[in-house]
Image (spheres, grey):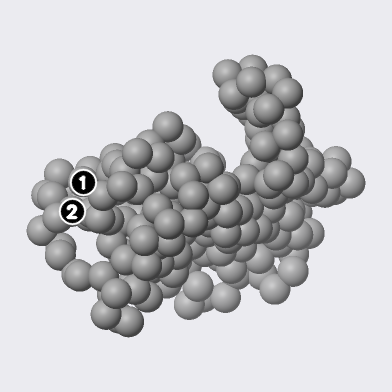
Amino acid sequence: MISLTLAAAAFALIHIGISGTRLRDVLVARAGLPLYMIGYSIMSIAALIWLISTYKAAPYLPTWGTPAAVKPLAIILMLPAFLLVVIGLTTPNPTAVAQEAFAQKDPQGIVQITRHPFLMGAALWSLIHIAANGDMASLLFFGSLAVVSIAGPASIDAKRRRSLGPAVWDRFTAKTSIIPFRAILAGRAPFQPRSLGWWRPAAGTAAYALFLGGHAHIIGVSPFP
């Protein structure tokens, strides 16, 4: 469990302590963006591999266990998590790598709902697994992913504001929000479901169905009660 704790801390520290911070700006200025991206990617992948391997090897130490009502609820909530991730990954977004130019345009599609759809989906996915698994190893593993996903949006926003300038970034963020639907409910952004298209939600639903059906074969644990 000590190895898993260290891996979880390293994974969170790399993402929260470097990416999006002024330390990143210093490293980019000294090494150049391509070299920084290569080094950061290697560290991130290595930390993720360490995290996964130590999670698989960790003993099962129950915390609150798995209440009977949690798994059905988890199955339901995984659908919006998948939709946020898949639609987010396939929608142009200035918060994504090398897509900063889209900040010059009004938010479109899922970005009207949240400008960090992938991270919001990952956060929901992580929190669902923490609740459903109910053990210490899962708390450390999914907890580190949840911390990075929840802390990431503010870090990315700060990085984009520095690189694009307050005028551009503040204009863009005024029409969207981090928390899903917050800007829409506040009247700052329109709700246009048609702008999502049909194939993105279909792809997210298909991915959800495939992963749900294959969860026992892929992960080794059935998601069903």
Counting every numbered tag in the picture gives 2
Q: Is residue 45 above or below residue 69?
A: above
Residue occupying image coordinates x 50% and y 73%: 70
Task: Out of 220 and 199, give the one closest to the viewer.
Answer: 199
Mark 1: few/some/many CA within 10 Å (<14, 14-19, 20+): many
Compared across the picture, whether 68 is left or right of 168 comes to right
In this orientation, does residue 224 appear? no
Element on which disc 1 rests: helix
Q: Position of residue 71 (x, y in %)?
A: 47, 67
Contact between labelled residues 2 and 1, with CB atoms less than 8 Å apart: yes
Residue 197: horizontal and vertical position, in percent? 13, 50
Mark carried by residue 200: 1
Label 1 vs label 2, nearer the camera: 2
26 with respect to 120 (left or right) = right
Q: Residue at x 15, y 63 (%)?
A: 193
Which quadrant holds the C terminus? bottom left
Q: Which residue is mark 2?
A: 196
- Quarter-wise, where is residue 79 in the image? bottom left
In percent of the image, x 68 and y 27: which residue is there?
29
The type of residue carrying mark 2 is Leu
Q: Secondary structure at mark 2?
A: helix
Residue at x 11% of width, y 49% of height: 198
